[in-house]
Amino acid sequence: MQIAKMAIVAALVFSYSATALADVVSAKGKGSATYVEQQAGTDTKAKALFAAQMNAIEFYYADLGDAEAANLDKIREQIKSNPDRFILDTTKLSEEDDTAAHTYTVVVRVSLNAPNLRSALKAASPIAAEPAGQSSQLAFIFLSRQVDTDTTYAARITQRQVVSDKGDAASATQHAGVEGEAIRRTQVSTTATTNTTETHDNEQTKTFETGGASLARSDTKTWKLIPSQSLSTAVALVFKMAGYRVVEAQYVEPLSGGKLKVASIEDDYQTGNDLKSTTLSGVVDGLRTAEVRYFALATLDVSQVGVDPSSGLKRVVVTVNAKVLDVAQRIPEGVAVAGPTQYAGVGPTEEEAQTNALKLAAQQVARELISQLSNVGLR
């Protein structure tokens, strides 16, 4: 009974930690400062510490990808002027005072306030300058799916053999003879001599030629969709927090004149990894009819459950691919692309691990798409 209670407590603690990790992130950084005194003083150490903290933030954004790293330039000065708003905690990992080089170096691990960083980026983005209610509307559909059937085809082998047989034969026969007769009174004598010569010449050549071909067919997969209303809610919140007027695709369908069909999108992704041309054309025409400029589309492929080696909990990996279409132009343009990127989620059960992985993947890829839109100044 005691063991069961401990297991429940551990699961609850993990669940809380997984939620907290989405808002508090850690990163390591290194900073140095020079001095003219015999050894590093308080001011020198403070300068090196601040440089290490900023370096940790640089590393954090570098890990997020090119789009996020580019956005850091927009809020760098804001972070420097008010670091306590973004840095929650700093731990010194190592320090070195090189008196010969008059250089003090420190390595730190910092805990960052991710929501405040995102809020600062939102305030600095082009869409933040739009008056309320005039920002662009964005429709989205994020489909989570898992392999239903996986058909593997054996290679078809064709073999060919050519046999060539050639032969030459020659034969010559020669006969030569001498016959004589002698007659004496009552006696007749005869003599005969015969010479025979035979020659045979036989030559035969055989040639074998073999060859063939092997024809292999690609494996085919079908997918089953995983219903997840909480996933759509999490994605909508990310886009809304970035300032977009966001709506799920199912709410656009009635306003599209029957052109955008969510069922057709789902059917295409149950049998492949792309929209059919007729489905895509309907999506574009339907968005224009409904006067929606942007369309975000993502697939989140869920792997089979495994075991996390460090915690022993269930572990699920999600591979995500996403893009944003801008249909305002005559020719629709892909203005943001993300993936394929993998995210892992863990939990005491397969369902919880899957939910954590899907939520993490959806939120992170949505933020990556928003960063790319911000970088090119789209509103």
Image (spheres, rainbow, N blue to C red):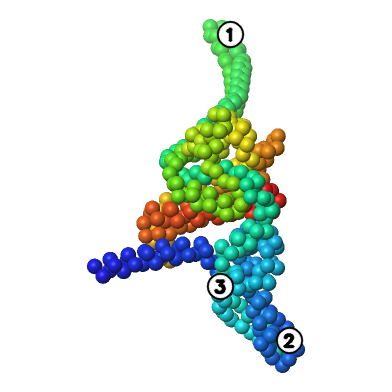
* Quadrant, the N terminus: bottom left
Q: Nearer the viewer, residue 328 or 67?
A: 328
Which disc is residue 183 wearing? 1
Q: How many C-alpha atoms fall within 10 Å of the one at disc 1: few (<14), some, or many (≥20)?
A: few
Dot 3 falls on a residue whose secondary structure is strand
List x then y, in percent, for residue 343.
51, 56
Mark 1: amino acid:
Ile
Residue at (64%, 50%) from the top-left corner?
132
Mark 2: amino acid:
Tyr
Q: Residue furthest top?
A: 186
Q: Earlier in the sequence, mark 1 or mark 2?
A: 2
Q: Gap between marks 1 and 3, in whole Å?
A: 148 Å
Instruction: Tell whether label 2 touches label 3 (CB within 8 Å).
Output: no
Q: Earlier in the sequence, mark 3 or mark 2?
A: 2
Dot 1 falls on a residue whose secondary structure is strand
List the residue tagged with mark 2. Answer: 35
Mark 3: amino acid:
Leu
Q: Residue furthest bottom?
A: 38
Q: Nearer the viewer, residue 250 or 153?
A: 250
List x then y, in percent, for residue 319.
52, 50
Quarter of the view holding residue 312: bottom left
Q: Nearer the viewer, residue 216 or 44?
A: 44
Dot 2 falls on a residue whose secondary structure is loop
List x then y, in percent, for residue 331.
69, 35
Q: Earlier in the sequence, mark 1 or mark 3?
A: 3
Q: Nearer the viewer, residue 276 or 110?
A: 110
Q: Is residue 53 visible?
A: yes
List the residue tagged with mark 3. Answer: 88
Quarter of the view holding residue 352: bottom left
Residue at (61%, 83%) from the top-left corner?
95
Residue 314 drawn above or below residue 30: above
Which disc is residue 64 wearing? none
